[in-house]
Image: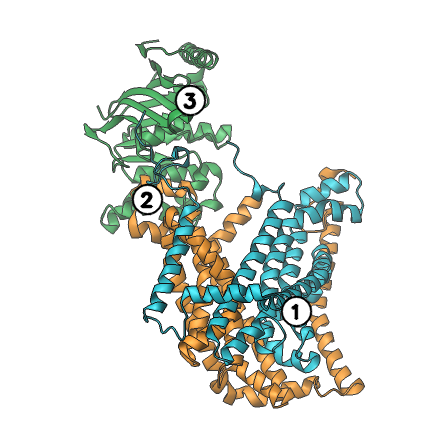
Chain colours: A cyan, B green, C orange
Amino acid sequence: MSAEVRSTLGVPLNELNSGGFQLPSWCWPLITVAVVLCFWEFCSRFGIISSRFIPPMSVTFAKLGEEALSGSLWPLVGDTLRGWALGLGIAMGIGIPTGVLLGSSPLAYRSVRVIIEFLRPMPSVALIPLTVLVFGIGLKSEVFLAAFAALWPVLVQTLYGVADTDPVAVDTGRAFGLNGWERLYKIKLPSALPYILTGVRISSAVSLILAVTAELIIGSPGLGQAIEAARQGSAYDAMYALILATGILGYLLNIGIMRMQCRLLHWHQSQRRIAP
Amino acid sequence: MLLEISNLGKVYGMGRNAVEAIGRIDLSIREHEFVSVVGPSGCGKTTLMKCISGLLESTTGEVRLRGKRISGTPEGMALVFQEYGRSLFPWVTARENILLPLKHQRLDKRVMNERVEEAVDAVGLAEAIDRYPWQLSGGMQQRIAIARALAYKPEILLMDEPFASVDAQTRADLEDLLLLVRRRYSITLLLVTHDIDESIYIGDRVVILSGAPTHVKEECVIDLPGLRDQVKTKELQEFARLRAHVFTQIRHDRASDTKKQAVRSTC
Amino acid sequence: MSVISVITKGHQPTVDVSSRRWSDARWRRNALGTTLEILVPLALLGIWEFVTTQLVHSFYFPPLHKILSTLVDVWFFDHMKADLVPSVARLLVGYGIAVILGVGIGAFLGLSRRAQIAVEPLIEFLRSIPPPAFLPAAMVIIGVDDGMRVFVITFVCLWPILLNTADGIAGVDQGFLDTAKVFGIKGFERFRRVLLPAAAPQIFAGMRTTLAIGLILMVISEMVASINGIGYFVLNSQRTFAIPEMWSGTIVLGVLGYLLNFMFLCVERKALHWHRGLKAGQNV
């Protein structure tokens, strides 16, 4: 049986991968990234894009390496991380308990529903001027903005998660004699966990966005502020290097949270693979 | 011969991990015939259907429709799937579902609508035609799927365990529906099922598949009166004999795993 | 209490002792809920007014009636034309382009598993760069004009929509694909009538979150580099210590966010009514 078997979409089935001339799947993203980087280098070096405005890839990475090794990068990263962590922490500290409360009590939810629905779509950046007036231009403003923006995803997700608990599960608990508190942390919270973690993931991204925004616009210490300073000082290679660093930070945080989500939800349906 | 399947085989994987889903199937179907295919669980019935209809490419062998070799999914075939929920499109109404396959046939609008109305009338769902599939019960949804296949006016109608996902009473209704539709549309049918009673009740001929590696173990001509009834036909001695015979063959094959030559007999 | 007699509708199961008593309790709860829904926000607004007029006179937190009167004065209709319209126009243009490009490219990606594997990690990286970090780069490359602002909105909104579309199309149930194949539905017909509707719920989910991001970027881009727009207005008011004006601008932004979200939900509700019906049926 040497004929190649193909599925309906014309792509060889994975089981077929006997190695040989078929590239493993992790190769392809690397090839794409390599192509893009070379393209960047080429365009910038040969003047297709003015190298004053976009320095070549090699220069940017070199600058990034230089900043990393010289130690000037890390305090900036630390500042941004601090703003992000405090913002996310406060958001979770307020959002999760409130979400649990609102999810458990329809009356409480209905009382504040209008307020949430109005505050939630508000772009938190609209509060920047007000925040500056009240908190100044330092870390406090950054944390306030990050926390305010990050509050809503985690609160709403927790709320939905707790409210959406399978009523049959709750009643099973009741039939077995569990009281209100026990039903909460033994049934409702675990079943709401996927929602809560999705909320945390979104909130983490939002917190980072607002932290960097605050640094950019207000001038709180951190990567955002350094990027803007580089731009104003026309130090474009430093600016791009810092943007790259910010991107890498965002990417790593995102992956970290996703890993954690997988770990904590290993029992959940969404993580199950179809049994072979 | 309307449909000729010769030497059909299907292997998944290569080398040491190869799994032979179908060993060798030879089967012919005449026009206007109703043929049922039964076999032990996991013998590759669904794989067989997918290979015949062109959804999966077979490893060996060929399928000929009216003498012409099939590649890909041919025009003259319609398939009714087991899971209607994953086959009927939930974003359009039942009418739209039935219309959609007709659109690329470049028919006159009037002709298309006529076909739809006729098919829906044949399956007895005229009043539900403008509802969405998810607004209907399982049995009604499967009727819509059948209507869709009928309106398509295929040369041969393929059905892959179509009544496995509905309850027993609905199943009986749908079986009778098929027999009714047969007289009205004079279709040719190839039906795959795990339900032995169903295979005998519906068919002119029963094809019994063996266990892995799958091949045609036996073909039985069904010598029952043409007009079938859920109660009376199943009371007949011939029905019971056929049923016992098929059941024994399948059970026997689940226990043993020997290759046998295909045997054609009037059993 | 027998489990069988417990009615599990809603969050608070009640025992069906007699239907009349059950519906009475339910009606009472409903009425109480509606009352609270109206009263609590009004009460909060009332408390604000009270505190700022009677208790604490704060320059940064003017009384409610002052904010509202400023809002009416300023925004109807001068600044509506001068600031609101340009802002919203930029947002809609940027968002619109992002949707068209995102769905188009995303559909193409979703159809090709190979392309997806090759390109997705890079796009995931681009997507996780905090959008404000792009602004300085855009200002350097494009300059400080409307084109830059629209470009930034488009660039940032593009990736989530693209990824969601690709995921949605790649995740179309095999049953639908097989059905389309058997009945000869192919090419653009298949895309329009099978793939796109099947992926629509996920595409809309991506579009909804992206709208919020677009709005944020619109405001930031105006705060950093603009001479008009709501974001510019709010920041400028703060800098010139025109506090009630600043508050009025903030409220306008809040209302804008609310309205955009509301309109989006209306569109989504219409387009995905079948999906809601399907899900509701499955939960029974």
Q: Is residue A142 above or below residue C60?
A: above
Please give the chain letter of the residue carrying mark 2: B
Where is residue A132, by image quadrant? bottom right
Q: Are marks 1 and 3 on the same chain?
A: no
Residue type beneath disc 2: Glu
Q: Which residue is mark 1?
A: A148
Name the quadrant of the N terminus of chain A.
top left
Q: Earlier in the sequence, mark 2 or mark 3?
A: 3
Q: Callout 3 environment at 10 Å: few (<14), some (14 to 19), or many (20+)?
A: many
Asked if residue B72 lies left or right of residue B224, the reply is: left
Q: Secondary structure at mark 3?
A: loop
The amino acid type, in three-letter code, at marker 3 is Cys
Q: Nearer the viewer, mark 2 or mark 3?
A: 3
- Chain on which label 3 sits: B
In the visual, does A112 lie left or right of B169? right
Q: Contact (CB < 8 A) between labels 1 and 3? A: no
Label 2 secondary element? helix
Residue at numbered disc 3: B43
B141 lies left or right of B215: right
Q: Nearer the viewer, residue B11 or B137?
A: B11
| Disc sitting over residue B117 in the figure | 2
Q: Residue at x 46, y 36 (%)?
A: B139
The answer to whether residue C263 shows anywhere in this view is: no
